[in-house]
């Protein structure tokens, strides 16, 4: 014996399904956006005891330089609120750079921004991408703590560069969405 439903019951079931789907769709797009701006302080003067970026691998018999394809660097830069190195520290930028273009003009970076300030303490933002000097945009590929499930992008540009001492300050702007 077949069961039949009245048109009113079918309409009500359909409406419940539509409302439920709309609620899930709204929840899926309900993201919190955070915009951050701060400054990396990079010291790449090889042999300087204060160096924060150092080469750790490269092609045998070739100089390990920023323009030499295959050179790998480890970085641990301070991040401050303003370009002044004495301004409040908010995070560390820790990761790897690899000169990834045969012509030596671009580097691939993968790094964690490890927050040390009170607001985001111990949270991280993970970034990854290839620089496109003078302005660079890389992907935010994840995060932890207050930035769990983060996605977005980060842009950077050189704020200050002293080629003689290899000290630079880089402005970093990060836009992330979290659920």
Image (tube, rainbow, N blue to C red):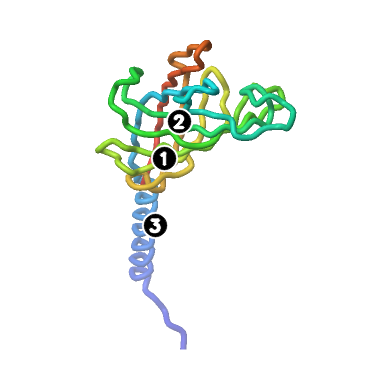
Q: CA distance from mark 3 to mark 2?
A: 33 Å
Instruction: Work out whether 153 lies above or below 47.
Output: below
**Residue in view at x 43 percent, y 82 percent:** 3
**Residue in view at x 41 percent, y 40 percent:** 125
Q: Position of residue 95 (x, y in %)?
A: 50, 37
Q: Which mark is residue 154?
A: 2
98 left or right, relative to 139: right
Assess whether mark 1 and mark 2 are in contact (beta carbons under 8 angstroms). yes
Q: Position of residue 131 (x, y in %)?
A: 56, 26
**Residue in view at x 35 percent, y 51 percent:** 27
Seen from this angle, which residue lies furthest left?
Answer: 118
The residue identified by callout 3 is 21
The image quarter in which residue 103 lies: top right
**Residue in view at x 40 percent, y 33 percent:** 175
**Depth check, front residue: 100 or 63:** 63
Seen from this angle, which residue lies furthest right?
Answer: 61
Whether residue 15 is visible to the viewer of this picture, yes or no, is yes
Please identify, in this view, whether the residue under mark 3 or under mark 2 is nearer the observer. Answer: 2
Q: Position of residue 5 (x, y in %)?
A: 39, 76
The residue identified by callout 1 is 125
Q: Residues within 10 Å of mark 1 (few under 14, many from 20)?
A: many
Please identify, in this view, whether the residue under mark 1 or under mark 3 is nearer the observer. Answer: 1
**Depth check, front residue: 74 or 121:** 74
85 left or right, relative to 105: left
Marked residue nearer the N-terminal end (2 or 1): 1
Q: CA distance from mark 1 to mark 3?
A: 31 Å
């Amino acid at each position: 014996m077949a069961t039949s439903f009245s048109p009113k019951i079918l309409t009500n079931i359909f409406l419940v399904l539509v409302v439920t789907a709309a609620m899930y769709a709204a929840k899926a797009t309900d993201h919190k956006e955070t915009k951050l701006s701060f400054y990396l302080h990079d010291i790449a003067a090889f042999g300087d005891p204060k160096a924060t970026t150092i080469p750790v691998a490269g092609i045998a018999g070739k100089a390990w330089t920023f323009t030499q394809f295959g050179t790998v660097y480890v970085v641990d830069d301070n991040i401050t609120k303003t370009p002044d190195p004495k301004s409040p520290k908010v995070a560390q930028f820790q990761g790897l750079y690899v000169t990834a273009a045969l012509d030596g003009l671009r580097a691939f970076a993968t790094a964690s921004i490890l927050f040390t300030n009170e607001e985001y303490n111990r949270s991280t933002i993970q970034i990854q991408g290839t620089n496109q000097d003078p302005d660079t945009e890389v992907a935010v590929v994840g995060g932890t703590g207050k930035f769990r499930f983060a996605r977005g992008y980060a842009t950077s540009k050189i704020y200050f560069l002293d080629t003689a001492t290899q000290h630079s300050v880089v402005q970093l702007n990060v836009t992330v969405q979290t659920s």
